[in-house]
Amino acid sequence: MFSKKLLSSFIIGTSLTTTLLTACVSNNNPTTTEAKHQAHTSQLLLNKPFVLSNNTQYTTPYTTNTSTLKRISITASISKNYANLSILSQGQVLADNLDLPKQGKQTINVLIDLKNTGSHELVFVGRSADITLHNIEIEDVSDIALPSFIDNSQQADFETEVTFKYGGPSIGDIDNDGDLDFVLNNHNHVPTQLVTNHGNGKVSVKRLFSGKPDLHGSALGDYDNDGDLDIVVAHGGANGTNPSSYTLFRNDNMEFKRVTGEVGIKTPARGRAPRWSDLDNDGDLDLIFFNAKTPLNKGPQTLFLKNKGDGTFEEVRVAGIEKPDASKALMVDFDRDGFDDVLMYYPDAVTLWKNNGDFTFSNVSEQWLPANVLKLKNINATTDLDVNNDGLVDLYFANGRSHYSISRKSLDFSPNLKKLDVNDDGEKGRTLIDFTADGNIQLSNAKFVFRQYREGFPLYLGKNKSKTYIQPHDYHKNDNRYPKPMEAAPHDLELKPEQALGWPEERSENGIYIGYLGNKQWKAEWVRNKTIYWAIEFSMTGLNSVDYDWPANNRNVQDVLLINKGSHFEDASQAFNIPKGGNHWGVTRADFNNDGWQDLFIHRYGFLKERVADLLMLNNKGKGFEITTAHGAFDAKDTGHGDMGQAFDFNQDGLIDMLNGSEDRGKWYLYLNKSPAVGNYIQFQVGYSPKANVDPLSAEVVITTTDGQTYFQTVGSTGEAHSQSVINTVHFGLGKQTKIKSAKITWRNGETQTFGQLKGNTIVKSQ
């Protein structure tokens, strides 16, 4: 029988102190002296094995008089399936819960910012399993500018509720005033919200729907060519039992009228990801609806609607591409032929479809995608970028576990907090654990994700199965989802050992069974005698240890970077230092430090009930990515999980900001880029084409700098999951260049506008 004990945990925050740890081992190796460091920019902090455990951390002094930005490389091994490693100094987190994603020996690296020169004490802390440190090396980094973000939400009057999110926001100039507004996609408790950017650093927020509809992704596009962006929003279908349609809001000078039926959007679907695209290159925008599979539906899963040019749509069949079980998509012109191609994914394997320009598509997956990528399922988000500035479109896949796959025997245990967090599935089965506790235990954070089952999930205590309830956290309270006693029960419940004496032999009814066996020994089992919920979640506090005889869910999977070779993509994940594990829910790209190379921001799900800092991956001149969590775009008090966002210049200061969503009891965050030492930039505000008045979606901007380097970008999103943006302020970092030699805007109908020499650090508007 497989036996496993959940091991170390450590809570990471912005002002963490090391008093939470019970043992400390220091390294006084003379190589860390000031004189030695002045002679070398790279040095060893550890060169013999050291084991991090529940009670032991590794501490070493370090002195620097050179750069405060450092790269730390760590070789470590674990005997369990996964672990996490953090680095602290003076109570501050330098690297937050780096993933060790597999059993065995592995090497990870991270950028840290010591903030100041002088003497420091570096503390290495493990979590989730014992970690054997074999080697730690630190070196100076002086040729990369580290971006720095601040949370500007409150200052911008951007106060949002705690909500479930759905695949990121949509960004665009919705009110036509020259700055970028956004649409927030919440799942149900709070409906889709429109956020208007007033151009003075402030925003206002309003809801587009009343009530609590089941809403998913959104997309912006000017379908009627009247000069402003309209909004289409996807509706769910009650888990397939009641398919609905999409809602199209026509923008009439910021008055939004529902025109869904009158424009021809009528077919019911389990809506997920709407997309605007000019599929036949006739100048107006057509619609694609990427949907979840509907049981018993024999029609196409993906719906195509052709814009008839008179403000209405006609649903058409498109062979091949309408069939895959894919509810997410990236619109990307991967071969730069002027037509929007489609990368489809989730939950089925990835497929790539070339747009033939006549409302037909060719499946080029086997020709273009590597064999390992053809097998990838459950990709969470994707983006296009030119990672090596060779003028070809590369692709990045953020890989992780969905809600559904996380709810497969996932557990996190913190010995320091004496807390166990559980997320298991609600399908037929049973899950048993043994645990120890010195005294009373507390139950909290219950959530039973609704799946049309309404009969309740009691607690059965002790041998006699005394019945009680805990109230789940549900935004739909009093909607007849749970029995009345369950809705009236407390959210938090404390149990004394004498309340749960003994263990029942018969445990067949749906519910959580808890029994005290004496001598600090307890058992718990949650039983599902049929499929009842999408997930069962709860926390237990007051525990000393936890044992179970089944393999826990390892939530680590690897992201993928594909480099475009002109005729096919090659997997360059290892060559570019892509993290070898993690649970990543989103990705957005931009040149965050204006050095002329596109960077990536990776949204991490984190632990079951704890947020971790997301990853900023800085492009090191096309040679690979440098990974850091020291960017400031993180709220340690956030109660949600990393989800998805968009990178754009909110305040038009030439630095790329971010709008990030925090999923499941988290908020939306507006992070401003306040980097002090970055390169120059130039931006192009792309409007409608000068002759045919074609809207800017998918327009391409190409610039050439005075040193001969060429860059390109298209108007659209900076990453996509369920939503689509029209970011028509196109940003280029220039590094040390102060001007560009030329620029050219090409709209999707082939119209162009060219520019001669232009100064940097300016916004250039198309005519």
Image (tube, grey):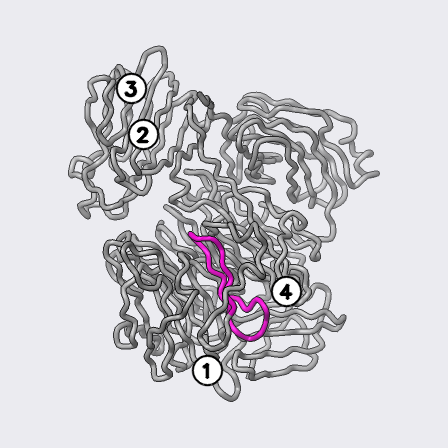
Task: Check if mark 1's residue and mark 3's residue have beta carbons within 8 Å.
Answer: no
Rounded to the nearest angstrom, the CA distance separating label 1 from label 3 is: 69 Å
Residue located beneath label 1 in the image: 282
Q: Nearer the viewer, mark 1 or mark 3?
A: 1
Residue identified by numbered label 2: 430
Query: Hey, what amino acid is under mark 1?
Result: Asp
* Nearer-the-camera pick, 234 or 231: 234
* Segment colored magenta: 331-354
Label 1 Cα crowd, 10 Å radius (few <14 / some 14-19 / many 20+): some
Mark 4 vs mark 3, CA separation in Å: 62 Å
Q: Residue 335: which numbered mark, if any?
A: none
Q: Name the amino acid, label 3.
A: Gly
Residue 313 in the image: state x and y as whole percent.
33, 77
Q: Is residue 346 magenta?
A: yes
Residue at image point 43% right, 53% down = 348
Callout 3 secondary element: strand
On the picture, is 654 further left or further right than 224? right
Above/below status of 487 relative to 679 = above
Residue 711 versus residue 655: which sits nearer the camera? 711
SS type, badge 2: strand
Does residue 204 appear in the picture of this structure?
no
Q: Amino acid at mark 2?
A: Arg
Which quadrant, please, contains the N terminus? top left
The tag on residue 567 is 4
Residue furthest bottom as drawn: 691
Q: Which residue is mark 3?
A: 515
User: Is label 2 or label 3 in front?
Assistant: 2
Residue 383 percent location from the top left of the image: 53, 59
Q: Earlier in the sequence, mark 2 or mark 3?
A: 2
